Amino acid sequence: MSTPAELARAAEALGATVPPPFEHPFAGAVEVRWIAPGRLADACRLVRDAGYFFESLTCVDRLDPHGVFELIYTFNTFGSASSRLVWRVWAPRDRPVPTVSGIFGAAAWNEREAWELYGVAFAGHPELTWLLLPEGTPWHPLLKSFTAPPASEYDDSLRAPPAAIDEQPAQH
């Protein structure tokens, strides 16, 4: 089984890594590399073929001021206590990122969440459909620029239940 350092070097040799767009330490991983969006699938195949599993995908809204999303893919293995590997991807808002759901099936759900809640597009994803929001929702609630959703048929928080309107306060 390959170590995280060996996989990081393999991704570099593959030409999948890019210089960090900024210096920001990442805790909780043995190796962290920035991956070019177009080489993400290749870098993920290296990890899968080494026996690692997909742990999670996290999206960070860096639209203001950078105009991008930061996607953080974490991988792990049951082989040792210090084996977490992280691929970070700087994804421009206007360009889809290749899906890795064909490499790691569990990634499909995380990609759907990032699409729905942030608006990240994943090229080649087999089923980008709503998970949590009503189908056709035109806004993305986890964007930093998001303030409040428009009123909708699904929002009853602004309407008092009829019983509460009819009840009078208790007299003391």
Image (tube, rainbow, N blue to C red):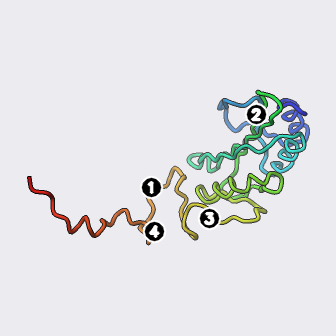
Q: Position of residue 89 (x, y in %)?
A: 73, 45
Residue 132 to residue 77: above or below: below
| First reached walking from the N terminus: tag 4 or tag 2 | 2
> In terms of secondary structure, where does tag 1 sit?
loop
Q: First in sequence, mark 4 or 3: give its number.
A: 3
Real-space Cα separation, disc 3 to disc 2, in angstroms: 30 Å
Q: CA distance from mark 2 to mark 1?
A: 35 Å
Dot 2 or dot 1: first in sequence order is: 2
Q: Which mark is residue 130?
A: 3
Q: Label 4 to label 2, Cα distance in Å? A: 40 Å
Please, is residue 162 above or below residue 21 in the view?
A: below
The residue at 54%/52% (across/down) is: 142
> Badge 3: how crowded within 10 Å, few (<14), some, or many (20+)?
some
**Residue 152 vs residue 76: left or right?**
left
Front position among marks 1 and 3: 3
**Between discs 1 and 3, the one toward the N terminus:** 3
- Circle 4 is placed at which residue position? 154
Q: Which mark is residue 84?
A: 2
The alpha-carbon separation of the residues under discs 4 and 1 comes to: 17 Å
| Residue assigned mark 1 | 147
Give the amino acid at mark 1: Thr
